[in-house]
Each structure stands twice: as structure tokens, then as C-alpha cells.
Image (tube, helix red, strand yellow):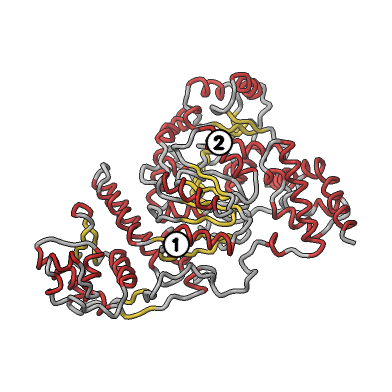
Amino acid sequence: MSRATQVLREVWGYSAFRGPQAEIIAHVSNGGDALVLLPTGGGKSLCYQIPALVRDGMGVVVSPLIALMQDQVAALREAGVRAEFLNSSLSRPEQQRVEKAVRAGSVDILYVAPERLVKDGCLELLDAATIALFAIDEAHCVSQWGHDFRPEYLRLSLLADRYPDIPRIALTATADAATRKEILARLKLDSARVFISSFDRPNIRYRIAERDNARKQLLQFIREEHAGHSGIVYCFTRKSVDETAGFLKDSGINALPYHADKLHETRDEHLSRFIREDAIVMVATIAFGMGIDKPDVRFVAHLDMPKSIEAYYQETGRAGRDGLPADAWMIYGLADVVQQRRLIDQSPSGEEHRRVAGAKLDALLGFCETVDCRRVRLLDYFGESSGACGNCDNCLTPPDLWDATEAARKLMSCIYRCEQASGFGFGALQIIDVLTGQRTAKVEQYRHDRVSTFGIGKELSALQWRAVIRQLVALRLVRVDYDRFNVLRLEVDARHVLGGRRMLQLRKPSEKVARPRRPRRDATSNRPPSDTLGGRSGDAFQALREWRKGVAQEHGVPAYTVFHDATLQEVARRLPVSLDELRGISGIGATKLDRYGELLLAVVRETAASTR
């Protein structure tokens, strides 16, 4: 480990390992197999990059995305590591250059796409090299129960048979117990040690609100809390992506759309701009973001509910990778529940798959509707216990609760009476009209103004009744029958409420859809330190960012591969005057100190001189 610590300090400029990194690196460096679960931003990459440099030979990293490979190779080269990648973006001469370097033993770390790795040509190339280890990144892609299943990952088990003496490390940010078991089995990691770190991302603030006007709510959120910040907005459909991006752009937000229907060149251009530029808001379908290393994403917003807690955790984890404050913001409504249930019920997959998908959706609904700490509920899903976090909407602005038993009984009785009167069921709109005593044409057509429940729910507005319905659906007391035009049906457990044997405490529905409120807290408390630096330090930080931008453009790499914001902030705070003072700043390794040290000091001196 002394050699590993030396590499950490000289290459990356860090003085100590975090969490379980040291134990993982020691195990893999000594030839052991491992399955590693670390949260996004938790330092997974170092767990295979350092053993690859410590062991003899070349580390081979299996990565599912071209953009991820390019970013990581760029960052490694900036740090002085001989890194290369093999993927479809390379021309034939470039590919030949990389292959020649591999055969010559002049590559420290090689990134390869899974579909390329399993081809005979690539395997023969690896046979000719000395291999230090195999790292399988985004390992949850091997799970057919997972949210990012990639069939080509299933063939990676051949590494165990072809290279039995070379250590393999599989890594992911999210996997429940069943998925972990599947990863181990499908990759033949029979004797691998499993390392599970905390899933907690304390710098992320979780916030969920009811949908009213989705785009206006989103615009207000960005303008009031994240003006000038990079962020990701997830939408369910490609049409919604295009329309939302257009709306934001028309509203003065620097927004770009990204989805599978976009021309390949356009997608690549948008991705490159998002990675390399500041203050870009990417509006995308959920396919976007896996493996994106951009550290300064300040928010992830969901305009539609994801499919599971794993998907939500993975997607929100793309915010705040630099450890600075970030927001996970979501709005949803009854339509999301209906849509997700329909997709599950109409799935061509087998009954077992639908059952698992339904259970995952139930867990997510429970997370959305909980009145307790969201972080406690989120971590509990992954088998981790915790106390109230003080950094989610429920902790900072506790929701009002009410005894909703009587309201639920009225609603359930109305569903039953309307169906009895007509011989078939009705959707939420009709049930609410009957409850609130609205003599609409449809109510009179079916004579629902004559049922005993007509008008018994006038104490709540239509909006409030929709909130009650949504929560009862989440509790599996009411279901939506998708095969019958989304009519409401009573579940078996509804009889316990109707019979007075079960009491219900629900979120108190408001008279109008509430804005996703800023939790009560000092206005600057959730702002990144870059927004709060003042005086000479603030001026120095902005000057350093401009300098970094120029260097990144000159080298053709993302700005954060030169230096992270956190490193530049520390330089701006300390205002060093010598290389020795720079050497102690986290993120400045030996190569970067030699390459950029004097330039950093010059920027600091110039800023100091201009502010005297």
C-alpha cells in the first residue's frame, strides 16, 4: 500500500484514500477479485486505476460509453498516465497506433467497449500483452432485472475462463441484493470479495412536489436556485425532451435536447458541449448520463417519475460528483403512477419480471409519498440504516399530516356506488365530480347525481381529491384499471378502511398545487462554495476558471480534467505564492504541478495586483 499511496499522491495529488478505497485497492493489487459498490462521486475509478499502475502490465477497463472513455482517458493523460481507448470513434490509423502501443507495452490503462472486447481480434491483442487487471465498470448493466441492462455484458464471463489468473473488479454505484447476486453469477466472480460503501450522498438535497404546470415549475426552480449552473432534466418521452428544451431555450436558459431520435452528429455535439462548457442544461431521456464524469452538475430534475429507486438513485447521483451542494428535484402526479403501472402490466416479459417491476415501483411510490425523511427511506431500500438527514424537503419543511380515514372511506364508497349504479367503473374525473356534487352532463347521463355519495365530499377541492387518490393508489388501496380506460377499482385491503379497522394518516392536500418550496434555511446554505467566495478569493477563483477554460480548449479536453472546481477554490482561498504551497493542495499531483504550477501562481499574482 505504500506504493499505492505514493501513486495517489504523485498522480492525483490526494494525501489519503477515502472510505473503503484503501482496502479495495490492497485486495485487487494483491490479485484478488472484487465487486465494488460505491456511490457516484465516491471514487470508484481510483479503485482500479491505482492497482493498474501498481501491478505489472496494463489495466483493461470495460466501459459502456464512448463519452466516458474519452473523458477518463483525457483526465488520465492530464495527470501523466499513459491511457488509451479502443472504440468506434477511432479511425483505422488511430486504431492501429493504439494496438501498436499495446503490443509495445507502452499503455498503462486501456479502455474498451464490451462489444469490442469479446471479439477475436481484441482478445488476440490482449493475449499479446501483459494484463494487470480487468475492470468492468457500470457492472449493473449485466443484470436483466436492472434499469440499464446491456446484453453484450453477458459475454464478459469469458474473461474468467480465458484469463483465470488475472484479477477482475466489477464496479457500480447502485445494486440491490438481488442485482449484486446476479452480477457475481453472470461474471463468474465466484470468489470475489464484495465491498459495499454507504449509499449516502449527503451533499444532495432530495425534493419532490406535486405536478401542476411542469415546465413553469421547472423554469422557476432553475431561475431562482440554479441560474448559471449546469444541470440535467429527465423527461419520459422524446417529444417531451424536445418541447421542454425548446421552452427553456425560449425562456433564456442555455438548454439542449438529447435522445435516441436525434441525429448521431447532433447528439455528439450536444454531449460535447454539456461536458466541456459551463451552465448547460441538458434535457434528456433516461438513457443519457450513465458514466458521465462531469463533476459540477448542480441539479438533476425529473419531470416524470422514474421506474424504480435504483433508477432514481443512479440518475440523481449524476449531480454533485464534486461533493459540493446539489439538488435532486422531482415533480410527479397521478398520471405518472398510471403510466408506470400500465407499462408493467402490458410488458411482454414474464410474470416474475412484472412482479419484480411492480414491487420496485411500489418502493418508489412509497419514497415519493413518505412524510418522513426521504434519505432514511432511500438508504433503507439498499439495506442501510440512518437517521433523519436534515437536508431533504421533509426534514427542512415537514409536511402537514391529517386523519384521512373518513375522506378515504367517502372516496372508496363513491367508487363502489358509481360502479354499482352503472354496471361498470369510472375514472378519477367522474368520481371527483360526483364527490364534489358537480352536475356535469356525464354525471347526469349515468344518474350519478342520485347515488348516496353525490356531494358528500364538498369539503375538499377537486385538486385535493386527486392528491388523496394518488396516495391511496400508492398505498395499494385503490388501483387504476388500464384495460378499462383507467377506471378506479378498490383493492382487497380497502375493506379494512371501509370497515373502520384501519386508520390513515396522509399528507394534507393543499388548496392549490404548492411550488416546490425552498426549505427553510439560510439563503446561501445550499449554494456551492464557488458562489460564496468573496473579495480577492472570489476574483482569483473566477480568473482561475477563465485560465482553465483556455487550457482545456487548447488541449481539446473538458475543463474539469485540467482541475476540478474544488481544487481551484482551494487555490483561491489560500492564494499561494510558491510551488511548495501549491504542492499541499488536494488535486494537484506531480505532473500537474510541473505542467501548470507556475501558470497557476501567475494567475494568482495577476489577480492580487489588479485588486490592490
Which numbered tag is attached to residue 378? 1
Q: CA distance from mark 2 to mark 1?
A: 33 Å
What residue is rendered at 47% in x and 76% in y? 398
Which residue is drawn at the image coordinates 55% and 36% (left, top)? 268
Spot occupied by residue 591 in the image (x, y as percentages of width and height): 77, 41
Q: Which mark is on residue 148?
A: none
Mark 1, secondary structure of its residue: helix
Q: Nearer the viewer, residue 210 or 572?
A: 210
In the picture, the quarter occupied by the C terminus is bottom right
- Neighbour tally class for label 2: few under 14, some 14-19, many 20 plus, Cα within 10 Å: some
User: Which amino acid does the dot numbered 2 rest on?
Assistant: Asp
In-front residue for pair 612/498 = 612
Q: Earlier in the sequence, mark 2 or mark 1?
A: 2
Of residues 469 and 187, the one nearer the viewer is 469
Residue name at image x 84 percent, y 50 percent: 603
Residue highlighted by disc 2 = 268
Residue 593 relative to residue 317: left or right: right
Indicate the position of residue 30 as horizontal and vertical percent values: 60, 41
Mark 1: few, some, or many residues within 10 Å (few <14, many ≥20)?
Answer: many
Label 2, secondary structure: give it: helix
Residue at 47% over, 68% down = 515
Where residue 63 sits in the image (x, y, percent)?
53, 37
Instruction: Judge whether residue 318 can be spotted in this image.
Output: no
